Amino acid sequence: MKCAVAAKNVYEPPSVQQLTLSRAKAIFRNHVKEFLELIFPGRLANRDTSAMVQTGEQYQKPAVRRLTPEQAKLLLIGHASVGNRGARDILELLYPPESADSRRECT
């Protein structure tokens, strides 16, 4: 005796969230904020960048800021880590690789 079994289609296509322009801007703003926090720790902690966009704050000319040696070094390492060949060359000039002889002297 054979029983007829009705097969049910259980496959559902994956739900894809549509990326809107406002969502893309928010994601980009968050990534920029995290990156700037690495370069300038503590400076952006009290600022809300989304409030600046909503209130229409007036444009201010960029000002020249003097970097500390540590900030400049971190910025240079960041550029070198993403593949900037010029930054990598400068790092090699400033911090030459140690030779095998100098490593033996330290131990």
Image: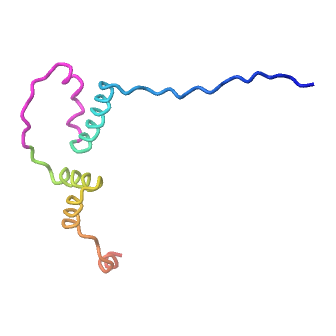
User: Which residue extends farthest bottom?
Assistant: 101
Residue 63 x, y percent position in the rendering: 7, 39
**Which residue is at 22% across, 29% downward?**
46
Residue found at x 16% / y 54%: 69
Which residue is rendered at x = 32% and y = 31% of the image?
27
Image position, residue 5 (x, y; %): 80, 23
Q: Quadrant of residue 104?
A: bottom left
Left or right of 52 in this view: 27: right
**Horizontal arrangement in the rendering, residue 103 relative to residue 42 (left or right):** right
Task: Identify the residue at the far right of this view.
Answer: 1
The chosen color scheme is rainbow
- Side of 60 relative to 96 (left or right): left
Check if residue 49 falls in the magenta segment: yes
> Residue 38's x, y, as percent?
26, 43
Q: Position of residue 39 (x, y in %)?
A: 23, 45
- Which span is picked out in magenta? 41-64
Q: How many marks?
A: 0
Between residue 74 and residue 8, name the one nearer to us: 8
Q: Quadrant of residue 32?
A: top left
Query: Which SS does the magenta portion mostly show?
Result: loop
In this rendering, is residue 100 above or below 18? Answer: below
Quadrant location of the C terminus in the rendered image:
bottom left
**Quarter of the figure with the N terminus:** top right
The reply to whether the magenta stretch includes residue 29 is no
| Quadrant assignment, res 35 | top left
